[in-house]
Amino acid sequence: MTRWLNEEEMRAWLGYRRMFLLLNAQVNRDLARDSGLSEPDYDVLSNLADAPDQRGRLSELAARMLWSQSRLSHHISRMEQRGLVTREDCKTDARGSVVVLTKQGQRTLEKAAPHHVESVRKHIIDQLSPDQIKALGDIAETVVGHLGDPARS
Amino acid sequence: MTRWLNEEEMRAWLGYRRMFLLLNAQVNRDLARDSGLSEPDYDVLSNLADAPDQRGRLSELAARMLWSQSRLSHHISRMEQRGLVTREDCKTDARGSVVVLTKQGQRTLEKAAPHHVESVRKHIIDQLSPDQIKALGDIAETVVGHLGDPARS
């Protein structure tokens, strides 16, 4: 027998979906306007900036973003043309192409980050109380823990 | 001066993004496996099922989904070919193409819904306490209220 969602559950589920759709659109619009970056551009740049030696395997980046390697490879090629990253072949593993943040990529990220934080603050973080921020962190931790994060396995 | 996110805020923001990415992928995989439907298929069917006379303007559906009308029009054409919806021209407004749920579309949704609810329960709702469900609903209401929902204006 189907356990349909009750009113509170439906409100949470549909509200969460609606929040994501609208918030994602707004934050991505801000990012494009302020910095000329797309969401995957920003993801790639910030992932590389946080990595040791500012580099990472394309396969691991793709797993983290839940993208196919071929899709990410095309995207990385376009970012290479813009001077944001470079690609190095891995000497020990032919499959292991490595993506490296360039100086220009780093500068682009450094210029984009303050605007991006401001957008995130304006549209979600500063709208919420400290209790709500704590609750959202806990909810996310629970759900991500249940699903299992391929980037950590 | 940039007000960077503190530790709790960063945990909430990055956790929320990660939760969405992983949860969306899982729920969409379940939906495709159980019912052969994509997420936009399901959105269109359930929006029409909830509408008066099980029909709605393509322009309003597109606004609700934040899709361009031409993108949704192509998607609707593919759903028409599968017998899930039909399209009627609006007599009073040439721009107002209307999308109508078919009997088969309704049956498809009715068969899909219990599986979809089970997937949503398994991967998020049943992972959360009643307090967390309430908190998530409140958070979403606040953020959607701040952003303004084009579907309600």
Image (cartoon, coloured by chain):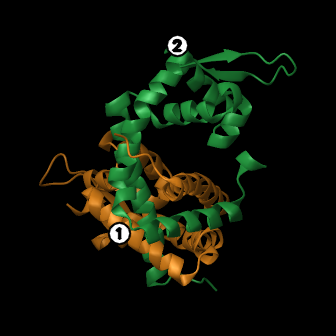
Chain colours: A orange, B green
What is the quadrant of residue A91 in the picture? bottom left
Q: On the picture, is B38 further left or further right than B69?
A: left
The residue that appears at 62% across and 30% down in the rendered structure is B48
Q: Are marks 1 and 2 in contact (CB under 8 Å)?
A: no
The vertical placement of A73 against B2, above or below, is above
Coordinates of residue B4 in the picture (x, y in percent): 54, 82
- Mark 2 = which residue? B81
Secondary structure state at the residue bearing disc 2? helix
Chain under callout 1: A
Chain under callout 2: B
Q: Which mark is residue A141?
A: 1
Coordinates of residue A111 in the picture (x, y in percent): 57, 71
Q: Nearer the viewer, residue B43 or B95?
A: B43
- Give the quarter of the figure containing the N terminus of chain B: bottom right
For the residues marked 1 and 2, what is the alpha-carbon distance in whole angstroms?
Answer: 41 Å
Secondary structure state at the residue bearing disc 1? helix
The residue that appears at 50% across and 17% down in the rendered structure is B104
Identify the amino acid type marked 2.
Answer: Gln
- Residue ranking furthest to the right: B92
Q: Nearer the viewer, residue B70 or A132?
A: A132
Q: Nearer the viewer, residue B37 or A89?
A: B37
Identify the amino acid type marked 1.
Answer: Glu
The residue that appears at 54% across and 83% down in the rendered structure is A130
Q: Are marks 1 and 2 on the same chain?
A: no
The residue that appears at 51% across and 81% down in the rendered structure is A131
Coordinates of residue A117 in the picture (x, y in percent): 57, 73
